C-alpha cells in the first residue's frame, strides 16, 4: 500500500478512487500469481498508454529483477557463450500484451471485417479464463474497447476499466472501474498515467 499512499499524497484528487485502484491491483496480482496475463486496449493516447504499461511490466521498472537460477542453469546447458550474454541482460517480467500494437491484424480486421472488431478478435484468441482485460477509454464509450470487454466477460476474464466522466458503457461490464474525477479528455489522460504507474510499481513490489 506504500505506493498507493504516495500516489494519493501526490494526487489528492484521486482519493475517491483509491479503493478501486487497490481492487484493480488485487485482481491483477491474483491473475499473475496464477500464471495468467494482462491484455490492454485503448485508442489514441490510450493506445499509447497500453504500450506504456506493457513496457513497465515486461521488464525492469524501478527495481532490479533477478533471473531465476533454474533458467541460468538451463541456458548454460544450451550454449555457454549465449548464457554469458543472456543472463546479464534478460529481465523477468509480467506478461502483458498491448492490443493496439498488432498493426497487421488490426488493419486487416478493419479492412476485411469492421474497424470495431480488432480488439475483440484479439481478446477472443488470446484470452483465457483467469486473464485480465484492461480497457482504457476516457469516455468509457469507445466501441472497440467495449466489444473487447464483452468478449472478455464471455470468456471469463476479469475486466478492469480505466475511464473518466461517468465511466460510460464500459463501467457496466467492469469488475472494477477506476473513473477519474475529470471530464475533459486531456485532463482524464493526465490522471490515468500516475494511476497505471502506481499499479505497475505495486505489482513490481509484490512480485520482485
Image (tube, grey):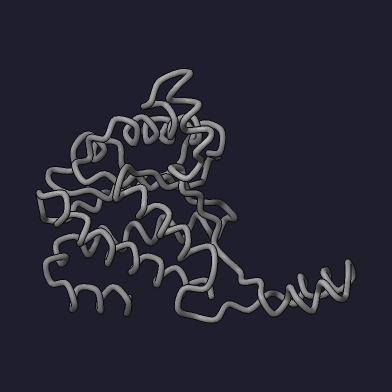
- Whole-percent x, y for residue 115 in the image: 38, 26
Q: Nearer the viewer, residue 208 or 175?
A: 208
For residue 91, which quarter of the picture? bottom right
For residue 16, which quarter of the picture? bottom left
The quarter in which the N terminus is drawn is bottom left
Q: Is residue 91 left or right of residue 133?
A: right
Give the answer, above or below, for where 89 lies relative to 126: below
The quarter in which the C terminus is drawn is bottom right
Residue at point 40% right, 59% down?
52
- Whole-percent x, y for residue 12 in the image: 13, 72
Residue at point 47% right, 57% down?
54
Q: Is residue 88 left or right of residue 117?
A: right
For residue 71, which quarter of the picture? bottom right
Give the answer, above or below, for where 80 lies relative to 180: below
- Whole-percent x, y for residue 21 in the image: 28, 61
- Outermost residue to the top: 113
- Whole-percent x, y for residue 69 in the image: 75, 77
Give the answer, above or below, for where 103 lies relative to 48: above
Give the answer, above or below, for where 163 lies relative to 59: above
Q: Nearer the viewer, residue 187 or 112?
A: 112
Q: Nearer the viewer, residue 82 or 75?
A: 82
Report the number of discs. 0
Amino acid at each position: 500500500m506504500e505506493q498507493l499512499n504516495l500516489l494519493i499524497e501526490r494526487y489528492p484528487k484521486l482519493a475517491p478512487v483509491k479503493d478501486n485502484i487497490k481492487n484493480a491491483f488485487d485482481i491483477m496480482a491474483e491473475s499473475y500469481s496464477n500464471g495468467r496475463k494482462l491484455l490492454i486496449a485503448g485508442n489514441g493516447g490510450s493506445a499509447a498508454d497500453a504500450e506504456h504499461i506493457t513496457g513497465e511490466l515486461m521488464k525492469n521498472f524501478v527495481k532490479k529483477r533477478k533471473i531465476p537460477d533454474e533458467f541460468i542453469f538451463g541456458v548454460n546447458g544450451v550454449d555457454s557463450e549465449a548464457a554469458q550474454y543472456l543472463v546479464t541482460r534478460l529481465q523477468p517480467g509480467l506478461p502483458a500484451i498491448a492490443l493496439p500494437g498488432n498493426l497487421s491484424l488490426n488493419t486487416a480486421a478493419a479492412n476485411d471485417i469492421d474497424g470495431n472488431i480488432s480488439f475483440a478478435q484479439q481478446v477472443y484468441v488470446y484470452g483465457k479464463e483467469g486473464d485480465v482485460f484492461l480497457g482504457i477509454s476516457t469516455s468509457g464509450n469507445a466501441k472497440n474497447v467495449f466489444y473487447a470487454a464483452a468478449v472478455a466477460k464471455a470468456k471469463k476474464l476479469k475486466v478492469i476499466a480505466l475511464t473518466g466522466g461517468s465511466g460510460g458503457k464500459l463501467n457496466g461490464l467492469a469488475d472494477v472501474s477506476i473513473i477519474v474525477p475529470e471530464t475533459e479528455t486531456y485532463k482524464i489522460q493526465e490522471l490515468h498515467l500516475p494511476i497505471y504507474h502506481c499499479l505497475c510499481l505495486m505489482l513490481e513490489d509484490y512480485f520482485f
